[in-house]
Image (cartoon, rainbow, N blue to C red):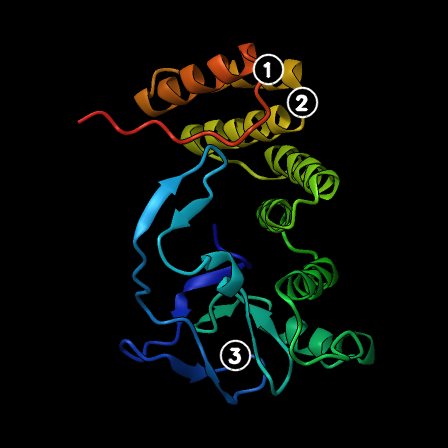
Amino acid sequence: MTPFFYNPEMRQTEDDAVMVMCPVCGNPVNNHAVEELYTVDVVESDFRVRTLDDDILDSWLVFCHHCLYITHDFSLIPDNIAQLREIVDTEAYRERFSDTNPTTMELFGHYLYLLEKAEAPPMVFADTYLRMSWLCEDEEQSSKADAFREKAVSNFAKSLLVSDPDRKERSLIYYYIAELSRRNGEFERAKKTLLKMDMKQSMFRRLYDMQNELIRARNRNAALMPREES
């Protein structure tokens, strides 16, 4: 899920380079490598990828130490780049960085502020809140994790109203709503939402069977994704 609204054709193309130019201020910045290789351990029911290496959540966001712009990938040039330049140049935005070495949660908070000021699409908010719930789970802050999951649910639902997803995308959004509702103990909402998925697609049939079993057991925990049939 792309973290900002951007034109996929507008990408810096320095082959395999980690150093690129910040699209906001033009200064050189360290970026994620074009291909970061991780050894995947498991994928959980909310699509969180667990690796055998470092937690990739800690490095999912990067920020420019020159202008303080935050993104997931500096090589992506957002459509609203002029608006973003204005936001990061405001005193209110820059004052948020009293510590230029923020924690992962603090960086997500700054990123959320940037999304709000730029009026990002609901899907971007949903993805961000979901990742913030993972951070809270890692810190054993269950009530905060529940709150972020509920915000993700609201934004996933809102995305169905303001966008026009195709059948697969729509089913995936319904799956996210069902999964996060189950994790928050909203079993009836989860069950009703699952039924809206397109069961003609084998992937969603498998996801439905997995979730249905978890809901019947009133299980709020993360589960392992079912393996694809060979």
User: Mark 2 vs mark 3: which is more N-terminal?
Assistant: 3
Pointer 2 with pointer 1, Cβ within 8 A: yes
- Label placed on residue 185: 2
Residue with the mark numbered 1:
218
Judged by depth in the image, the label closer to the viewer, 1 or 3, is 1
- Residue at the location (36% across, 41% down)? 42
Q: In this figure, which residue is indicated by the disc labeled 3? A: 23
The answer to which of 69 and 30 lies nearer the viewer is: 30
Helix, strand or loop at mark 2: loop
| Mark 1 / mark 3, whichever is N-terminal | 3
Tell me, yes or no, whether the two marked residues, 2 and 3, touch with CB atoms within 8 Å: no
Give the amino acid type for the residue marked by disc 3 in the picture.
Pro
The answer to whether 183 appears left or right of 29 in the picture is right
Dot 2, how many residues are within 10 Å of its Cα: few (below 14), some (14-19), or many (20+)? some
Residue type of the residue flagged with mark 2: Gly
Whether 204 is drawn above or below 92: the answer is: above
One can see residue 226 in this view:
yes
Residue 120, position as x, y percentages in the image: 65, 55
